[in-house]
Image: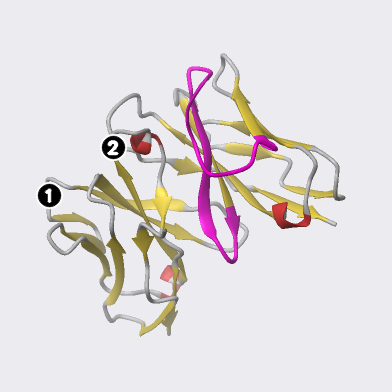
Amino acid sequence: DQQVKQNSPSLSVQEGRISILNCDYTNSMFDYFLWYKKYPAEGPTFLISISSIKDKNEDGRFTVFLNKSAKHLSLHIVPSQPGDSAVYFCAASGRGGGSNYKLTFGKGTLLTVNP
Amino acid sequence: KAGVTQTPRYLIKTRGQQVTLSCSPISGHRSVSWYQQTPGQGLQFLFEYFSETQRNKGNFPGRFSGRQFSNSRSEMNVSTLELGDSALYLCASSPMTSGSKNEQFFGPGTRLTVL
């Protein structure tokens, strides 16, 4: 039972354009969402997060949008740079049942930004 | 602040052996979580510790165990290793003490290969 889904295993974008990475979730108890970036042979690096009381959070070139009714969130990177090429993971945590003490991850999307 | 450190970085074991992995969290972080990353399953939660107590455990067999010390350092142990235990084991620390806001900061991981 995959509670956090990233349906696109890969995405290729031209440098300078917008990258949009998508994530869907099924557990209505999730109320905090995070995006991580991962390079090979390294641990995931925290990028940006959003609480369920918001629908948008912005940090520099990164913006996360949350649509609670659709149980969908997206990460926008503008403008995309070659150094952004990595695997991006969507993660969620929630209330109760110990779920606030763990992150549930999607399987990741490999972003390639072409020069 | 120094980041999360994990030792060793690489490990090769044979089936049936046991292994202990170590994690030192970011100074001041009292929550430590462990995740297993494999190509097929992505990042899966193993367990989380806070103040030397396990607060949540993922769906892994009893061969996987962990503990946390009074200085917040943590170890995980895998006994009777199987080929399928080959994975990247990631440790993450968080300043979180309660609630669902759960920004976790990851170490570089320990790459375990079971032959």
A73 vs A100: above or below: below
B78 sits to left or right of B69: right
Q: Kindly state the secondary structure of the residue where label 2 is placed.
A: loop
* Part of the protein shown in magenta: B37-64
**Dot 1: element:** loop
Q: Nearer the viewer, residue A70 or A16?
A: A70
Q: Which residue is located at x 59 percent, y 48 percent?
A: B108
Label 1 to label 2, Cα distance in Å?
A: 13 Å
Which residue is more in the foreground, A57 or A2?
A: A2
Counting from the top left corner in percent of width and height, residue A29 is at 24, 45
Residue A7 position within the rendered picture, expressed as x and y whole percent measured from the top left: 37, 73
Q: Quadrant of residue A8?
A: bottom left
Which of the numbered marks, if any, corresponds to residue B46? none
| Number of marks in the rendered image | 2
**Which numbered circle lies on residue B101?**
2
Which coloring applies here?
Answer: secondary structure
Magenta span has B35?
Answer: no
As shown in the figure, which amino acid type bears the numbered disc 2? Lys
Q: Quadrant of the N terminus of chain A?
A: bottom left
Chain containing the residue with disc 2: B
Looking at the rendering, which quadrant does residue A99 occupy? top left
Locate residue A20 relative to residue B106 in the image: left or right. left
Residue at the image position 81 percent from the left and 38 percent from the top: B18
Indicate the amino acid at tag 1: Lys
What residue is shown with label 1? A54
Magenta residue check for B63: yes
Q: Nearer the viewer, residue B36 or B73?
A: B36
The percent coordinates of residue B61 (x first, y second) are 63, 41
A72 displayed left or right of A53? right
Vertical arrangement, residue A95 with respect to residue A63, above or below: above
Q: In x, y percent, where is residue A40?
A: 59, 63
